[in-house]
Image: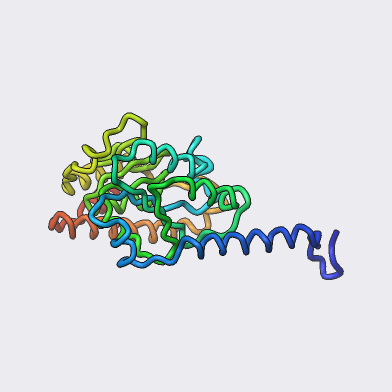
Amino acid sequence: MKSRLGFKKYPKEKIDRRIAGEKAYWNNMQSFGHWDEKKLEKAVGYGKFIYYPLHLQPEMTTSVMGGDYKDQMLSIEHLSRILPKGWKIVVKENPKQYYDYYYRGDEFFKRMHSIDNLIFVGKNIDTKWLIKKSCIVATITGTAGWESIRLKRPVLTFGDAWYDGFPGVYKFNPKLNLKEISEEKINPDSIRKHFESWLKNCWVGIVDSDYEMISERSEAVMQQDLMGIFNDLDEITAFKDHRTIQTLRK
């Protein structure tokens, strides 16, 4: 059914249900999310924690690339079962997330409440700070995993991340020894070599003809992003040489 202006009318009960869901989501967020760095450090104490930044959902990064772990709480539940004694999982909500019945409904928060060694910190604590304070970062396929190994923190992935196979990256399985993983020393030079090798197996292309008109701009953005990545790696390795990018373009 449409209004005279041509906009589709939604049933009032559907709108009311959506509003109720949004209120419930933000109430849940408020009940969890009043944390700052000092309060979190006090709660964790001198113990170790695994940082788990939640993905925005629904998105391809979990719905397609996450497999069974498109249910992020399932991955957190499985992780909690192999957590060493005294360790915690610090879960942070995605800053862009909103209410979604399937992914952030009441059941999601009930399951979170049931995990004793979990701290949920909302959206206000800096991700880089959390990575540096953690001993391991866990993610389905997220960019936080890539940021983590660049900051010399090992990573657990539950889905098919593009950086799987890089030094310090482990595919989750219930037999992993998290204490051993947390003690791994990650060599930034090795990360750089893996990244260069991975990049040489990529090529410029368009997956959908609709994107063709923005391809020139996309290439410029890609080059800017690559330069940013190499600059970050340079800060870690103190190695200043960007010739790799020019080589890849030939």
Q: Is residue 203 above or below residue 242?
A: above
Residue 20 point in image, percent of width and height: 68, 61
**Is residue 209 shown left or right of residue 237?**
right
- Quarter of the image holding residue 195? top left
**What residue is rendered at 16% in x and 45% in y?**
187
* Residue 194 picture quarter: top left
Work out whether residue 63 can be spotted: yes
In this view, the residue farthest toward the bottom is: 5
Image quadrant assignment for residue 129: bottom left
Q: Residue at x 76, y 57 (%)?
A: 14
Q: Nearer the viewer, residue 208 or 124?
A: 124
Instruction: Compare residues 131 and 161 and report the one nearer the observer.
Output: 131
Which is nearer the eye, 96 or 106?
106
Identify the image quadrant of the N terminus. Answer: bottom right
- Image x and y of residue 127, in percent: 35, 60
Q: Is residue 250 visible?
A: no
When the figure is inspected, residue 29 is found, relative to residue 142, above or below; the finding is: below
**Does residue 64 appear to the left or right of 231 in the view shown?**
right
Q: Outermost residue toward the left?
A: 238
Question: Where residue 16 appears, x then y in whole percent?
Answer: 74, 62
Residue 232: percent from left, percent from top: 24, 59
Q: How many marks?
A: 0
- State the residue in front, 144 or 200: 144
Q: Which colour style is shown?
A: rainbow
168 lies left or right of 14: left
